[in-house]
Structures are given as C-alpha cells and as structure tokens.
Image (cartoon, grey):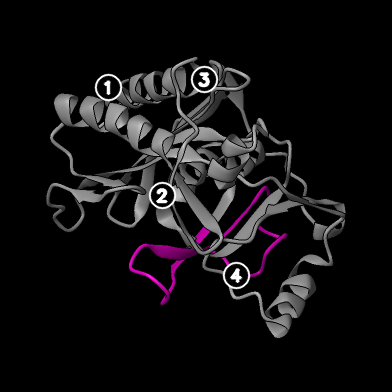
Amino acid sequence: MNWEKELDIAVIAAREAGKYLAGPHCSRSVNGSDGRDIRLKADREAESIILDCLLKNTGYPVLTEETGEHGTQEDGSPLWIVDPLDGTVNFFRRIPLCCVSVALWLGERPVLGVVYDFNSNQLFTGIVGKGSWRNGQAISVSGIDSPERAVLATGFPVNRDFRLNSLVGFADRVRSFKKVRLLGSAALSLAYLASGCVDAYIEEDIMLWDVAAGIALVEAAGGRVSVERSRRHKWAVKVACSAHENIFCRRK
C-alpha cells in the first residue's frame, strides 16, 4: 500500500481539530486533573472531531489519549494513534507550543504521521519510506553525528519518577549534549527533529500517543528510531530518536 489516501484523511482530521482548537469557541475549561497532568474540555472536543473523521473514512481501529481504544485491533493490522492536543498544559497557559498528533501504525512500526501546529499553521506530514514534509516542502534530519554537537529535545512525562536518584540519572544521560530543550510537547519536539531544528530526542515512560506521529516523521525523514515497551503502562514506551546513528548507542 502507498498510504497516501490514509495520509490525506489524517491531514483532514488534524486540520479540523486544529481549526477548533485555534478558534474563538474553544474552551480551556478544566475537566479534571491527574497528578501533574490536567484534562481540558478542549481535549475531548478535538478528539471527537478526529474520531468522527477517522472512523467515518476508514475501517481501522483507533487508540486515543482521552477515551482509549475504539474498535478491535488484530495482530499486525493498521491502528490509528491519536493525541488530539499534545502539550495540554502549554495550551492551557497560552504557551504556543502545542499541536494535534495523528499517526497510523502497522503492528509495532509507524506507517505515517501528521503533526499540526495550529498556532503557526505548520503542518508536518510523513510516510515511512517516502519522506517527510513541512507545509508540502521536503524536510530531513540534520545529520549531526555526535552528542557534543547536538541539540537534544526531551521532557518529563507525567508518570515520571521525580525522586533525586532518578533525576540524577536523567542529568547523567543528557549532560553530554551541546544543548537541551524541554518544549512541553513531544510531538512538536519530534517534528523539529524531523526537520533538522534539533538533533535528538529521548524520553522514558511516555505514552505512545504522545510520540507515535512524531516517530513516523523522524523515520520518514531519515532519522534513527528506537522504541521499547515500558512496564509502567500498556501503552507506555521508551523512545530514543536521532539524526545519526552515532548519537545513541541503543537503537532498533
């Protein structure tokens, strides 16, 4: 399959959700909180828009951040993976680093990804094996080949252990990089990696829907990708992506 039809559907879904999130009728009211995370009415509304588009136009099951699994996935079959609003806290505080994330995976591997930054109207798209694009223009990873020259994007997932020894371990892993950036949006961080703005991304115990589309973009843009399942949650993963294989030793 060439997946271009599915990419078009994902783009429509992401744009429609982004239009709502950027519009005057979007609510920032808080529906609840869970530890360090918050849940907004806007998350649910944007997810509803995306679900309606994906389920109406394809027969593939969908995994979403807000409401979980829709439909039954068979082993190795396509699965939509959706984060309707990645960077919820940024959105709530009006920090313009948030986006819509829609991905299609086949089994354990990415097929395509769409990340729509509705604040700047930047649309990142990619099909693994074909390429990645930003607003229709081809993009690629930087090619930086050492951490000493690389800018690393990372973050602290909401279920991260914040005890001192864990934080010391985190500092040890990132200290070799030239610069470190914490943007508050995993999907945008990976889109920036795919377009050469940063050179690496790592995060542990992050949920798959946060990174699924971005991982597809990076792989399609020529980057190196490692994804390992975490024991913390069914859909939690450990991710290491880079512009060059020499930046990280642990890869798949």
Q: Which residues are magenta?
A: 226-252
Q: Which residue is mark 4?
A: 250
Q: Which residue is mark 2?
A: 209
Which is nearer the eye, 132 or 166? 166
Q: Amino acid at mark 4?
A: Arg
Q: Quadrant of residue 162?
A: bottom right
Q: Which residue is mark 3?
A: 22
Local SS, label 1: helix
Report how far apart the C-alphas of labels 1 and 2 lie in the structure. Answer: 21 Å
Q: Amino acid at mark 2?
A: Trp
Report how far apart the C-alphas of labels 3 and 1 lie in the structure. Answer: 26 Å
Q: Earlier in the sequence, mark 1 or mark 4?
A: 1
Instruction: Mark 1: give few (<14), some (14-19) or many (20+) Cα within 10 Å.
Output: few
Query: Could you tell me residue 22's position as x and y percent?
Result: 52, 20
Closer to the eye: label 4 or 2: 2
Local SS, label 4: loop
Local SS, label 3: helix
